[in-house]
Amino acid sequence: MSGVQVPPPLPATLLNKMYSIVRDLRNIKNVRPLSIVSAGHGVTHWVNGIFIVLLPFIAQDLSLTYTTTGSMVTIFFIAAVAVTIISGPVIDISKKYILAQFLCLLSGALALLLMSGANSTLILALSAVFIGICVSGWHTPSIPYLSLLYKNKRGLALSIHTVGASLGDGIAPPIAGLIMLVLSWQQTALLLAIPVAFMGFYVLKSLPQIDTDQNLEQSSSSKYNYWDGLKDLLANKDMLILCVLAGLWSMTQNGLVVFLPLYLVGEMQSSPVLVGFALFSIQVGAVFGGPIVGSLSDRVGRRPVVIYSLIISAMLLIIIPLLESVYLFILISSLAGCSLYSIRPVIHSWTMDISAGQTSGSAISMLFTAQAALTGMIPIIGGLTADIFGLKLVFVLLTLTSILALILSFIMPNKITGV
């Protein structure tokens, strides 16, 4: 029929998108800092992935209830809130981006060392604190660092940064699961701490310093300008809405990752290898989808990308309680996880769009504080729900948080200028 345009096949569309991403990457003059920071980001999530995979087996050995097990994750988020509140102003004023990234990785190595000797809930809780510092503390220095280096390709650069996170989240669980076929969880945690420490020293030695005076056009009154900009940021309605939206999105995403292995081990008696594979499969789509979605958001805007991803995740999450097959359960959970994880760089870029250069660290601090504060409630609420009503109802709860985030995404404007 004349006048009707037939869309290109999906594989061709994906190839075109991947080609445009490769072309954009080739236009970046120096990708080495991006590669190093992205790898470091991956290692912080490597620590988190190991924690999530080992937690059900630690809980079994220590005879922990779902509520107590969930509280370990809540402790992680309490530490995350504390470190993000403190680190935002510290990073914005000191500009010690590289040192802060090193300290986060060092914290991750210490967390796994503590976990390897966790014979009580107290030591496990202390390990969770250091994991919170490692994972959440990383974003405050790394995202502004990359945003300053790659100002014109921010969405793409931050999407590559989140590919590192997805790779860490993805490969750590199956590796930990395979190692646990021959080693105990204590020995597994100890062994997997080694690459974390190595990466920390590599980041400290290899990353180039940023000329902050040139990038931020600072004057002698930079500290006054910072606090003035921070006041404007805190009064920005779009920033406040985005923080709540991101918190609800993070509740959904992290709730899925926390309760998926608990369901597989507790209800379906799955092996460590299958649990690791399930968590890996969540990240596969995010690894490829993140750069596509991040680059697309640079062109069409952040809001439509977030809206469509949240719609897909809500539709998939509501199906999960109806599934009886373990493999179908993993498939649908993985698709839901992929749709959630793929918009992580978009939300980060949205935050950088709102903030001015001098308050970028505090903007990230606000975002991750809101995320950690709201997400920290989901392990306790989900654990209580699972203990009283069963684990299946937890996935209904996650559907609700996804829908609430979707509602807020409709309120956000598509085009935003910094404060």
Image (spheres, rainbow, N blue to C red):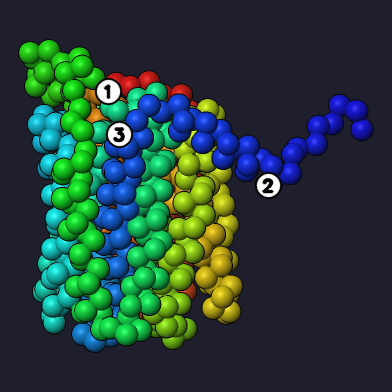
Q: Position of residue 281 (x, y in %)?
A: 49, 64
Viewport quadrant of the C terminus: top left
Which residue corresponds to the image point at 26% horizontal and 58% vertical from the top-left?
376
**Residue named by callout 2:** 11
Q: Under tag 2, what secondary structure?
A: helix
Q: Amino acid at mark 3?
A: Leu
Give the residue drawn at x 81%, y 32%: 5
Q: Name which residue lies at 26% across and 84% down.
A: 184
User: Which of labels 3 and 1 is toward the front?
Assistant: 3
Q: Which residue has dot 3 on it?
A: 146
Which residue type does callout 1 highlight?
A: Ala
Mark 1 surroundings: few (<14), some (14-19) or many (≥20) residues within 10 A: many
Q: Amino acid at mark 2?
A: Pro
Q: Position of residue 229 (x, y in %)?
A: 20, 22
Q: Secondary structure at mark 1?
A: loop
Mark 2 Cα shell of 10 Å, populated few (<14), some (14-19), many (≥20): few
